[in-house]
Amino acid sequence: MASFNRVILIGNLTRDPELRYTPNSLAVTDIGLAVNDRRKGANGEWVDETTFVDITLWGRTAEVVSEYCTKGSPLMIEGRLKLDSWEGQDGQKKNKLKVIGERIQLLGTRGSGGAGAGGEAKSYSGGARPSPHRQTQQDSYTSQSSYDDATGDYGGGSPVDDVPF
């Protein structure tokens, strides 16, 4: 049976990123993203709905977001869904669905600081090695593997270099 777990979100940071490091010196940060949706309600009026998504970023991606982004910064995040389960203090089983971010794109405009002085979007995904697949003016970084927080190591994965929008 085939499966596919991919999420692409565009929204604004709900708080300043706080960078931490694991005992193995791997950077990690948890961020919140507010994603807005607008639709027509039953009465024909436009209704705005905001969804708040928790996202975990690892490695160079976490460092970039911590360095260049603040509360309100616009971001595009590509990653996968992960269900965390634990037992609460009251003995009840708790679950939380979150996103493990594997690739980001800073979406700031000229002068906003989010995308640099040139106003171009910058894209990062885990590693610090320039992507050989992209020959654009964007700063693009990719890694040949992705971090698996369940096992605590990097596994073989194929990074996605181009998003069709």
Image (cartoon, rainbow, N blue to C red):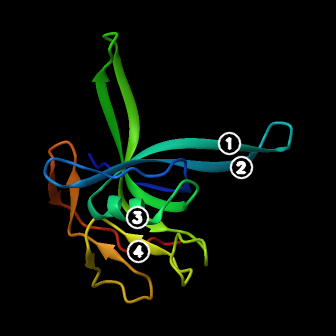
Q: Amino acid at mark 2?
A: Arg
Residue in view at x 55 percent, y 60 percent: 73
Front-most of residues 152 and 117: 117
Front-most of residues 15 and 53: 15
Residue ID for mark 2? 38
Residue in view at x 57 percent, y 48 percent: 34
Q: Position of residue 86 (x, y in %)?
A: 29, 24
Q: Give the alpha-carbon distance from disc 2 to disc 1, as whole Å.
A: 6 Å
Front-most of residues 101 and 20: 20
Q: Give the alpha-carbon distance from disc 4 to disc 2, as whole Å.
A: 27 Å
Per the image, label 2 sits on a secondary structure element best described as strand
Label 2 with label 1: CB-CB less than 8 Å: yes
Q: Earlier in the sequence, mark 4 or mark 1?
A: 1
Residue ID for mark 3? 67
Per the image, label 4 sits on a secondary structure element best described as loop
Residue 67 in the image: above or below residue 15: below
Q: Amino acid at mark 4?
A: Asp
Query: Which quadrant of the view contains residue 58?
Result: bottom left
> Would residue 77 appear left or right of 25 to someone viewing this image?
right
Mark 1 neighbour class, 10 Å CA radius: few under 14, some 14 to 19, many 20 or more: few
Residue ID for mark 4? 162
Residue ID for mark 1? 49
